[in-house]
Amino acid sequence: MHTLPTPSQPERNDTPSALVLGARGAVGRSVVAELRSLGVDVTAAGRTAPDPQGLAIDLRAPSGFAALREAAPRFDVVINATGIEDPRLLSATPDTILVDISATAAYLDECTAAFARPDSGAHGPHGLVLGVGIAPGLSTLLVEALDSTPGDEIDVAIMLGGGEAHGPAAVEWTACLAGKPLYLPGDADSHPGGSAPVLNFQDSLQVAEPRGTRRYLRADFPDQLLVGAPRQMLVRSWLATDSRLSTAALGLVGRFPALRSLVSRAPHLGSTGWRITARNRRTGQTLRADGDGQSRTTGVLTAHAGLAAAKHQLRGAATTAQLMSLAEVDGLAGLRIAAPSTAPKSAAPETTATLNA
């Protein structure tokens, strides 16, 4: 685990420029639209140029990283919304700020390690933003906003709308988690059976909600890496969809990973709403955010994180929680931050926890 330092943040007053990779995708389109609405000079990039002023940068082709390395220094910030996870992105984005929407803990840790190498400043970005969007990103902000001390255990319950059609990269990311060990579970030694690894979608948490109890599945979102381990806390992430049938199917895939191809063929059951609830087991303090449209909200939050990094001329690595506050994101893309509440002090896998969701 490589700790993220706290960045210095000198202000700037001019309008920054941004290059958005993967601008044709659902999240990328949202990033571009939000940045342009904020007056940012945006260049959209894709495997083919998305518009007459755009760039063709195909990171799946051998020439893609060379094209990115040539273009990147002209921009204050480069946002990777392609879903491609490749540490070569750092060496291909010299003298700028790189923002990556990845939710993969192992990849984010690898990027942080590469960025921390002594020679990285001469060959890569001078700023790196990891953990942007809904989860991580907004979830990271919620965890940071809880009153907590070292040793606390935090549950982050992430409910995504099963009715939203996601891009291939997002579907593949979810399917690939099935049956795999969590990268940095933090609680492996306390897992039933001793030191057995904690596997995605196998442990579950029953959460009491206004319309009944909902089952969430343990999932490898990176908030333990981004905020839990650095603050000596244990952050467990749990995933569900608003369709109980879809969540049950995901649990089945977790038990039988050979069925993971079913994830891409599953019907879109449910709505497009989403909810994130963060709760401190020791105190019962609970924070919640909800909204509609996961891809759009992810893009809007990513755009604002990138803009904040550019305006502060970020030098170093940072998370969304080091660049923005809950008050600053409340209302973006229609998302709502609920007032803090206190729930009963209990929660363990396979038990019922009241999260006031």
Image (cartoon, helix red, strand yellow):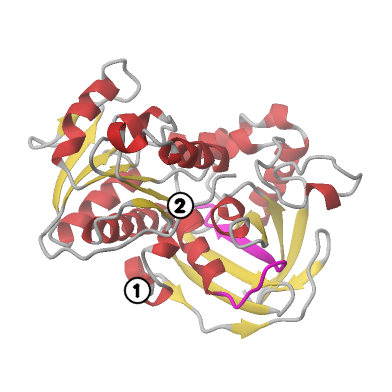
Q: Position of residue 210 (x, y in %)?
A: 65, 77
Residue shown at the point (37%, 70%) measured from the top left:
329
In the rendered structure, which segment of residues is drawn in magenta? 146-163
Depicted 246 relative to depicted 44: above or below: below
Residue shown at the point (67%, 51%) measured from the top left:
247
Q: Which label is found at residue 328?
A: 1
Q: Which residue is mark 2?
A: 131
- Give the secondary structure at mark 1: helix
Q: Amino acid at mark 2?
A: Gly
Total marks shown come to: 2
Is 74 on the left or on the right of 244, as rendered?
left
Choose between 209 and 156: the one closer to the eye: 156
Q: Position of residue 167 (x, y in %)?
A: 42, 39
Q: Is residue 156 visible?
A: yes
Residue shown at the point (17%, 43%) measured from the top left:
75
Density class for disc 2 (Cα within 10 Å; few <14, some 14-19, many ≥20) is many
Image-quadrant location for residue 261: top right
In the displayed orientation, state which residue is furthest to the front: 118
Residue 161 within the magenta-colored segment of the rendering: yes
Q: Amino acid at mark 1?
A: Glu
Q: Between marks 1 and 2, how big is the CA–CA gap?
A: 17 Å
